[in-house]
Structures are given as C-alpha cells and as structure tokens.
Image (cartoon, rainbow, N blue to C red):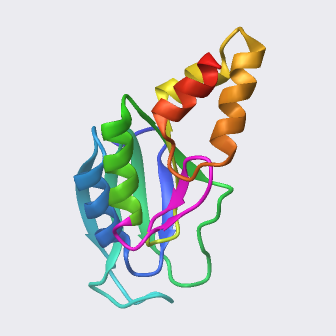
Amino acid sequence: MVAKNTICLWFDGTALDAARFYAATFPDSAMGAVHRAPGDYPAGQEGDVLTVEFTVAGIPCIGLNGGPEFRHSEAFSFQIATDDQEETDRLWNAIVGNGGQESQCGWCKDRWGLSWQITPRALVAAFTDPDRAAAKRAFEAMMGMRKIDIATIEAARRG
C-alpha cells in the first residue's frame, strides 16, 4: 500500500546509490521497489532507473532520477534523533566519511547534497531545560561545534 504522503527527493542519476546508503545506514530504514523508465525522458533513456522507493528512519521516500536541473539545499533536511554519543558518531561519520561534508551545530551534508541534522536527544533536553541559563549555556556550547559532543553539552548545561 502506498503511503498518503511520501517525500520525493530529486537526484541526478544516483537515486539507487543514495537509497542503498540510507537503508544501510539509518535505523528503521529499508529499500523498496526500483522502477525503470518505460521510455526515454529528458534525464535518461528507457530502462534507466527512474524512481526508487525507500524508507529513512520510518519516513517513506521516493528517489527520482530527474537530472541535473535541481539540487538539494539546506531548506530541507532530515533530523535524526540519537540516543547517545556512539550513535551520534556512527551516523555523522557514515555521512561525512562517505563523501559528505561537515557543517555546524550538528548539520552535515551527504555526498548527494542532502542535509542531515544528527541531533542527540540530550541536546534537545538541554535547549528545553526550564532553567533558561542552563539552556543558554548549552546553546552557546553547541554554536561552536560541528558534530555534537554530548559530554560538552551536558557540562555546559550543568554550568
């Protein structure tokens, strides 16, 4: 059964590679059907992979090999909640170490240009601390980070 709402991500011929990577990297992710073009189209030929169905952390997606016209931007990202530093490190390193690039405050891009926020639950807890001074200290600590360091966030929160 097709989901009522599915995220469609545009790729330049690499949707299958991206879907495989996401399915292998993120929990609760999987590959689905691969559909080939029934005829020639502006970005490919009959028989080329046109769309790929996959799930990323429980979210249904379709990768569309639409060509080079459109690129991913930071205006869209997946935010992945992590439970500890080990999971944070594993996901961050998988993205950045597979041709991606680091950004700031827990953001990074994969090699296809898709943005990810690798966000420890401890960071969200720190930002929402009813002690606004503790929340501010944690926020200021995060502002200097690329990958989030939970121990540093928790130390800043404690003061």
Residue drawn at the location 48% of the way across and 40% of the way down: 149
Q: Is residue 115 visible?
A: no
Q: Main secondary structure of the magenta part?
A: loop
- Relative depth, front residue between 35 and 21: 21
Q: Which residues are magenta?
A: 97-110
Tell me, yes or no, whether the highlighted magenta stretch contains residue 59: no
State whether residue 101 appears in this view.
yes
Name the residue: 53% across, 24% down: 154
Q: Is residue 85 above or below residue 157?
A: below
Using residue 111 as the reference point, say whether residue 102 is left or right of it: right
For the C terminus, the image quarter is top right
**Residue 93 lies in what quarter of the image?**
bottom left
Residue 95 drawn at (x, y percent):
39, 60
Seen in the picture, residue 157 relative to 93 is either above or below; the reply is: above
User: Which residue occupies 52% across, 69% down?
Assistant: 113
Q: Residue furthest top?
A: 130
Quarter of image, res 125: top right
From the top left corner, tell me how far across and down residue 98 is, in percent.
34, 69
Q: With respect to residue 151, does 79 lie above or below?
A: below
Q: Position of residue 134 (x, y in %)?
A: 69, 18
Q: Position of residue 74 (x, y in %)?
A: 65, 59
Viewer-nearest residue: 112 or 144: 144
Query: For the N terminus, which image quadrant?
Result: top left
Residue at point 51% right, 89% down?
42
